[in-house]
Image: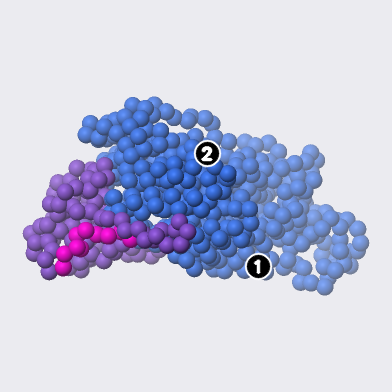
Amino acid sequence: MTMTNPVRRLTQGCFSYLPDLTDKEISLQIEYGLNKGYAWSVEYTDDPHPRNTYWEMFGAPMFDLKDAAGVLMELQNCRKTFPDYYIRLMAFDSTRGVESIVMSFIVNRPKNEPGFGLARQETHGRTMRYTVHSYATDRPETERGSR
Amino acid sequence: MEKAVEGVIKDAKKRYSAGVLKYRQMGYWDADYVPKETDTLCLFRITPQEGVDPIEAAAAVAGESSTATWTVVWTDRLTACDSYRAKAYKVEPVPNSPGQYFAWVAYDIILFEEGSIANMTASLIGNVFSFKPLKAARLEDMRIPVAYVKTFKGPPCGLIVERERLDKFGRPLLGATTKPKLGLSGRNYGRVVYEGLKGGLDFMKDDENINSQPFMHWRDRFLNVMDAVNKASAATGEVKGSYLNITGATVEDMYERAEFAKELGSVVIMVDLIVGWSTIQSMSNWCRKNDMILHMHRAGHGTYTRQKNHGISFRVIAKWLRLAGVDHLHTGTAVGKLEGDPMTVQGVYNVCRDSYTKTDLPRGLFFDQDWADLRKVMPVASGGIHAGQMHQLLDMFGDDVIMQFGGGTIGHPGGIQAGAVANRVALEVMVKARNEGRDIKNEGPEILRQAAKWCSPLQQALDTWGEISFNYASTDTSDYAVTASASA
């Protein structure tokens, strides 16, 4: 089962149109962020709905971790724990006037990416109400993913 | 200027006796004036008529853009007139431009209504640009004091909140203008939007002259576009948008269109610059109230920004628009089909995105500007750019920019989706390479060629447009002397 977009997968994050980054390549991105003073965070979910803002945090952002190998180790722990989940790395910049996420890319995906359906509700005139539905959430939470 | 000039007439009786005085005698020139923190400072480029003394011309600019009329009026004496007079305080010849002078003018904070671009501009560019003793005048740059900045609400979202809403971080955003600009039916138009977004773009865009013409009424466009946007969002799992141009004949029409865009769930609406300042500020307020991103297309600006001797520089327009409150602003590409000297364009990007803009003469920035935490505007690079220029664009503009490849997406030989893929792959591969520490300015073409080996749409894009460039001399470049005193 694949999605129908040209890269046949979820395209969130900075590098979804590229071949999966190797751990070495991921380390280079982590280092880039650390050199800029960002704090890295590992987050995971099985529901990548475009409006699902709050993925689960695999621990708090690593404000004091300045070593790319340490960040990568956290990612590897997360992969071990949640191998069939989406996992993303996010970098936080605390600079006044930014104070937000400044890098984000997916570093782990489930074997199957079920994608989304579009539900249309016809209302007045030709006006339509749209709901993007995450197929991954069709089953109860306790029966999803591999823990 | 070195030579001694007639100064202000101090004796009140003489000063206010009926008749005509020189502007500098009336108090509009003060070489010793020290601008206050709360003053608005303007730098004008003026071309006095033959025989008109540049200092008198500068004083006239100060006078005509504040309280003066052509003759003495006794009613001045009913007012604290000295504080209402703008003061020209410095005049210098423009380097390498015979007959042209830079004139610095200071305006007291009492002169302008709080939070009103319309009021401020009615003074600064109201009468003075038609003033006969000047052949030409241009407002080159200005410093808006923090005290006045804080009376404006600024961008309804700003680029930080926009990224949080869209869930897109660490890379420029990608867009395309739906083409052809005119003639597509609503249904055909939505097709182009769907293909572009599903292929990998973040945004599609109405063009500036798409409103509600016979071939496609605005409701048809909005309905079809939003179907395309939602379908593409489901196909990719990303938030997508298409700038719905709500520009119309009346403000009431615009509100109606904005409401419908909201009802359909659009994340963004669009307004053309030609609607005017009050309308822009009204639409900005509406966007704040309705969680909407406001895209500004600078339609028409070239009529007054492009020629160096007369008009208003675009950096000034950008400052006004940041205060007025827009989230996106077309600011040029430097490498594309439209006017734009790279340094001058970068200066405008700074105006949009800085927390504090530093004086930078090569980039046309004559003043420090403290933005007092006003939200930042996302600049838009649009007009004749293609995937083969990705390294130049990323190197020049960084991450906080929307790159719009209209023809460069829709004109792709493999179709619109392939065009979008080519642009997205080129973008991601370049961001990745830059972050890895590679010198993308020089290695860029090679990085693209390598990616094209596994991405045939990118190969096709490079084959089609790789050699296209628009190398014409820019008309709007910064004039400065290396030794010129930088600030007020």
Q: Along the horizontal axis of the image, is B160 left or right of B59?
A: left
Q: Residue furthest right?
A: B18
Q: Along the horizontal axis of the image, is B332 left or right of B388?
A: right
Q: Nearer the viewer, residue A3 or B103?
A: A3
Q: Position of residue A68 (x, y in %)?
A: 17, 55
Say which colour chain B has. Answer: blue
Q: Report the Cα–Cα distance between label 1 and label 2.
A: 43 Å
Look at label 1 and name its amino acid: Glu
Circle 1: element type: loop
Label 2 crowd bin: few (<14), some (14–19), many (20+), radius 10 Å: some
Q: Residue at x 35, y 30 (%)?
A: B413
Specify whether residue A135 is painted magenta. yes
Q: Quadrant of the C terminus of chain B?
A: bottom right
Q: Residue at x 27, y 55 (%)?
A: A117
Chain label for disc 1: B
Q: Position of residue B480 (x, y in %)?
A: 57, 42
Q: Check if mark 1 and mark 2 are on a common chain.
A: yes
Q: Residue at x 68, y 36 (%)?
A: B98
Q: Nearer the viewer, residue B429 or A32?
A: B429
Task: Name the residue that disc number 2 marks.
Answer: B183
Residue A40, located in which quarter of the rendered image? bottom left
Q: Position of residue B466 (x, y in %)?
A: 36, 29
Mark nearest the camera among 1 and 2 is: 2
Specify whether residue B276 is painted magenta. no
**C-beta proximity under 8 Å, tags 1 and 2:** no
Q: Residue at x 82, y 61 (%)?
A: B9
Provide the residue span drawn in magenta: A131-141
Look at label 2 and name its amino acid: Gly
Q: Which numbered dot is residue B113? A: 1
Q: Nearer the viewer, residue B425 or A45?
A: A45
Say which colour chain A has. Answer: purple
